[in-house]
Amino acid sequence: MRLIPVLDIRRGIAVHAQRGDRKRYGPVQSCLTSSADPLVLLEKLHAALGCTEVYVADLDALEQTGDNLNLLTALATRVGELQLLVDAGVRSAADARRLLDISVARVILASEASAGPHQVAEIGHAAGLENVVCSLDLRERLVVWGTPASPLQSPDDALASLGDSGIRSVIILEMDRIGAETGVDSHFLAPLIRRYPEMEILIGGGVRDIQDLLILQDIGAAGALVATAIHRGTLSRDDLALLSGGASHGPAQAGSG
């Protein structure tokens, strides 16, 4: 299983996510560095953990108040062996291609920025399924889609729809657990992972320490998105050696589960 550090960016600086309530996000405070400069943090994450993937969320693009495209371009080329998974509020195939053109490894298609599984599939096929990951953004265990008319949906139904359309990489992101250090809910997550073995399923939200990562590994998660535990120093390179396959592996091939 892979550890994938997270960088949330707003107005050019890295911020600390808290339960998905973006009004409360302030500059990140990290044991790795006193800087909230995303470029500095990216290098520190790579040096401290040996990771080869980093998830980056452009909050300005997600909220449609601007973007950090120049910064994303710099991040994508800062450390040669690092691959970026970028969530920048992609709403069209053109948006996805713009990110791929700046050497982003994989584009996140977030449910909160999408009209539904059909739009995710449409963009995914246009951009290349191997280049995209769908993020199912959950609140109270229901998927939040991006249009007011879109009904809330169970993650099980969403995974089934995405699987039928050919999507093979998915993040289950529990937004109300982000930055809350609540731990992971294996009773909720394990049945979802078990029902879709053909999918690469990554988990975000709630990870506190290596024990939570080992739980996710045991239930078959392909990887975990982590921020707070890294910045507080409760996860180290030595901890990650306990994960089978190590934390330095690159993205699994689509369909490897």
Image (cartoon, rainbow, N blue to C red):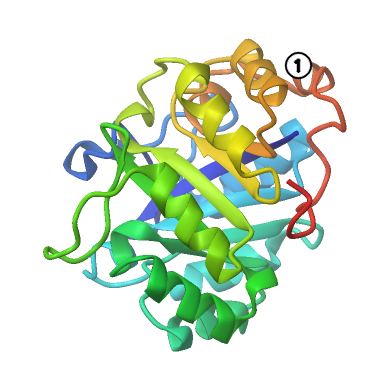
Residue at image position (79%, 58%) is: 253
Please determine whether, in this image, residue 199 is positioned above or below residue 206.
below
Please determine whether, in this image, residue 177 is positioned above or below residue 27.
above
Dot 1 crowding, Cα within 10 Å, few <14, some 14–19, many 20+: some
- What percent of the width, then of the height, locates residue 190? 57, 26
In depth, the one of 90 and 197 nearer the eye is 197
Tell me if I can see residue 14 in this picture: no
Residue at image position (62%, 44%) is: 196
In the image, taking residue 113 as reference, residue 82 lies left or right, namely right
Q: How many marks?
A: 1
In depth, the one of 251 and 14 nearer the eye is 251
Q: Residue furthest left?
A: 148
In the image, taking residue 173 as reference, residue 140 lies left or right, namely left
- What percent of the width, then of the height, locates residue 235? 65, 19
Please determine whether, in this image, residue 14 is positioned above or below residue 146.
above
- What percent of the width, then of the height, locates residue 193? 60, 36
In the image, taking residue 238 as reference, residue 17 lies left or right, namely left
Quarter of the figure that contains the N terminus: top right
Tell me if I can see residue 215 in this picture: yes
* Three-letter code for the amino acid on which mark 1 is drawn: Asp
In the image, taking residue 66 as reference, residue 105 lies left or right, namely right
Residue at image position (61%, 79%) is: 100
Q: Residue furthest top?
A: 211
Please determine whether, in this image, residue 185 is positioned above or below residue 42.
above
Q: Residue furthest right?
A: 245
Quadrant housing residue 91: bottom left
In depth, the one of 152 and 17 nearer the eye is 152
The residue beneath circle 1 is 239
SS at mark 1? helix
- What percent of the width, then of the height, locates residue 233? 59, 18
